Amino acid sequence: MPVTRRAFLETSALALTGLAASAKAHAAPTPSNHAAPAPPTVVASRNGIRGVRKAYEMMTNDQADPLDAVIAGVNIQELDPNDQSVGLGGRPNADGVVTLDASVMHGPTRRAGSVAALEDIASASLVAKAIMDYTDHIMLVGKGAKRFALGMGFKEQNLLSEESRQDWLRWRSQLSPDDDWLDHEDDVMIERPGGTINMCGVDANGDIGSVTTTSGLSWKIPGRVGDSPIIGTGQYCDNEVGAAGSTGRGEANIKVCGAFLIVEFMRGGMSPQEACLAALERAVAMTEDRLLDGKGRPMFSLNFYAVAKDGRFGGATMYQYPDEYLEVLPSRGSYAVANADGARHEPLHYVYDQNQLPGGLRDRMMERVERIRMERAKEEE
Ligand code: ASP
């Protein structure tokens, strides 16, 4: 169903009624009393499939703290040079420099840490945690953040992999036919990929931790900071309610404080699934005209993931992926979950079905499908 302004207002009114009806909604969070055992559950963006397994095992086998567990989960992607959206091997900014954003939140102690525009240190999530653990601040950025990390013993390394450097060179050469950089015939068209990993976990005591880490939007203007390191936007956690996080267009999420909004929606009575969809609808309602198609639908994607204190979970995205797309990239349109039923991908719910995809978005997806098909055919030759 397309989201009309009226539907949005109705959803919001409903949520607000829920909030008003609940005295707890206005109460400051109190420390967990460990009274209600929860089925341990971890949710993450699609690329967190290895990480949710690890985090779940750490929480259940080793009684690890939920924040330590989800950070260990995202460390797998941060240190994997083949994940070009996070940490080592992440795609660089317009100057060819990899800069990382990350944030963490620890439910039981109600603490948070965050780092933005961090250079040369792969595990930004651990730097965010060190800021939480060792300082009275919540957020450090740029040069100061790197100095802090080096002082804490983090290792300095070149984060730009050869693959990401080549992608950046291609992007630069394709920027304009009139510039001084030559295009090469073997250059495939370079898209503008994003990518991030968010992971939220609740342990058997109902204690919660959440983390989001990213190299951000590829080819961004140097200095740009996305949603991931902003507490309440890239991720948020309230030990009395649950946690949520996001991937996708950070600029759309920042304007709705998506992760905080989802947790508040859950506090008001929505399920994690309903809360993720309602937050996406809010993001649509807050979209400026230049990013809407003729029918009022956004020309970008945004994803939310959430887990409740009792182990219920959900995930939602703006658009259903077209069938052709899922044929070549089957895990798209899904998110990662681990609980007593194992680690697996679950389908993301969506605001708009594939027939409602704006033409421009659909064309870009279909071009990608074609390119992947051609690459695979070439490999088979
Ligand atoms: N949310 C990330 C950012 O805006 C990018 C992404 O997840 O694609 O930096």
Image (tube, rainbow, N blue to C red):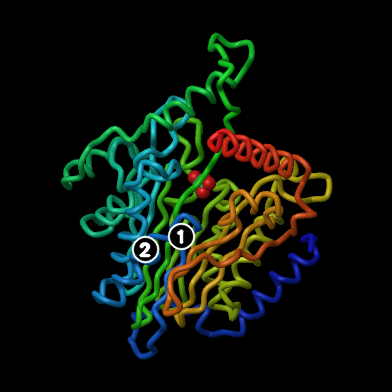
| Few, some or many residues within 10 Å of mark 2 (<14, 14–19, 20+) | many
Q: Which residue is mark 2?
A: 105
The image quarter in which residue 279 lies? bottom right
Please state if 24 lies on the left or on the right of 189 as rendered: left
Quarter of the image that includes the N terminus: bottom right
Which residue is rendered at x = 32% and y = 54% of the image? 75
Task: Tell me which numbered mark, 1 or 2, is placed earlier along the sequence.
Answer: 2
x%, y% of residue 283? 65, 56
Q: Which mark is residue 235?
A: 1
Q: Pointer 1 and pointer 2: residues touching (CB < 8 Å)?
A: yes
| Few, some or many residues within 10 Å of mark 1 (<14, 14–19, 20+) | many
Amino acid residing under circle 2: Met
Please state if 322 lies on the left or on the right of 80 as rendered: right
> Whole-Å distance between the Cαs marked 1 and 2?
8 Å
Q: Relative to the observer, which residue lies in front, 278 or 30? A: 278
Quarter of the image that includes the C terminus: top right
Q: Relative to the observer, which residue lies in front, 236 or 136? A: 236
x%, y% of residue 182? 55, 11
Q: Is residue 132 above or below residue 217?
A: below
The image quarter in which residue 160 lies? top left
Q: Is residue 73 above or below residue 108?
A: above
Q: Looking at the image, which residue sits at the far bottom?
A: 35
Which residue is rendered at x = 42% and y = 31% of the image? 163
Which residue is rendered at x = 32% and y = 70% of the image? 66
Q: Is residue 310 above or below residue 178?
A: below
Q: Looking at the image, which residue sits at the far front?
A: 381
Q: Which mark is residue 287?
A: none
The image quarter in which residue 359 lies? top right
x%, y% of residue 353? 75, 59
x%, y% of residue 61? 27, 76
Q: Relative to the observer, which residue lies in front, 185 or 231? A: 185
Name the element at disc 1.
Answer: strand
